[in-house]
Image: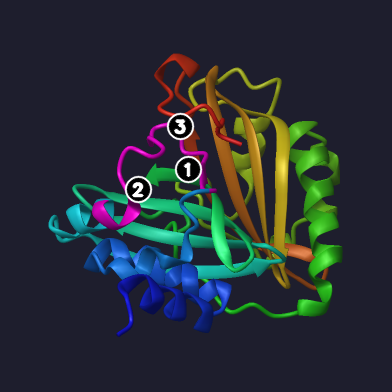
Amino acid sequence: MQTLSNKLYRVSMTLNNKEKICKLLKGIETGDPSSVSVVNEEKYIQHNPQTHEGSEGLAELFKRLSKTSPRVNIVRVFEDGDFVFAHTEYDFATRNIGFEIFRFESGYAVEHWDNIQKRKELNSSGHSMVDGKTEVTDHEMTESNRSFIKSFVEEILIQGNFDKLNGYINQENYTEHSPNLGDNLVELKRILSRSSNDTSAFIEYKKCHRILAEGSFVLSVCEGYVNQTHSSFFDLFHLKGGKIIEHWDTTEAIPPCSEWKNSNGKF
């Protein structure tokens, strides 16, 4: 007779890594114990500073959460070597948008990062935080697109060299999904400008920690400040023809270390 652990192992090994993460995230809805079979909880490193490690098994956690009738919509999912990253929409007590990153080792998820923001209404150009293209194309461009976004983050977001912006963004065919920005890039330049007199929405990128890519999509993971509040920035870019044509993001305040529930750090 097969034990539950043997059944979970069989489920875990028959799925690819993208499918494993989709099953894991959808397990929040259902409470299905097999959904967490993709995680090696003995090695699992949690980088969400508001989540305890080891206090409650994921199966028990998902079972408890499922009783609140949550909804999880996985909008986009990508794979980069040992990493899977997903763009998600959650409806618990409130509606949130998130990016989830998982690192795999020997077929199991062993490390996790995320960035969650409350869902806001359509931006000034009429776009939501999750609509837009979802299909990955141009797989042969993965490494060149990764390098391109690495340069964009450094030159534009961190250094603020806006005179080089035309070299990075196709402004004639650009779609902006950030709730505080529009397609015409005016707001982007304003909130990143060091000389701006309006500090109500001043954003400062300080360091890029990770760039993940699959074909035409690239995700950057950065830290910095929003109006002097220590924050994390997860930015997803869609590229075509060597330029950025679409952008999504989430911004989350990082709590002070005294409030962290694990010692692994946000990044």
Image check: 114 left or right of 174? Answer: left
**Residue position marked by numbered label 3 in the rendering:** 49
Quadrant location of the N terminus in the rendered image? bottom left
Q: CA distance from mark 2 to mark 1?
A: 9 Å
Q: CA distance from mark 3 to mark 1?
A: 25 Å
Cα distance in 3D space between marks 2 and 3: 23 Å
Tell me the residue that label 2 is attached to.
120
Q: Is residue 198 visible?
A: yes
Label 2: state its secondary structure: loop
Whichever of labels 3 and 1 marks the residue nearer the N terminus, that label is: 3
Query: Label 1 sits on what residue type?
Result: Asn
Residue 47 in the magenta stretch? The answer is yes
Q: Which mark is residue 180?
A: 1
Residue drawn at the location 55% of the way across and 64% of the way down: 108
Q: Is residue 26 above or below residue 1?
A: above
SS at mark 3 in the image: loop
At horizontal 63% and vertical 32% (from top left) the residue drawn is: 223
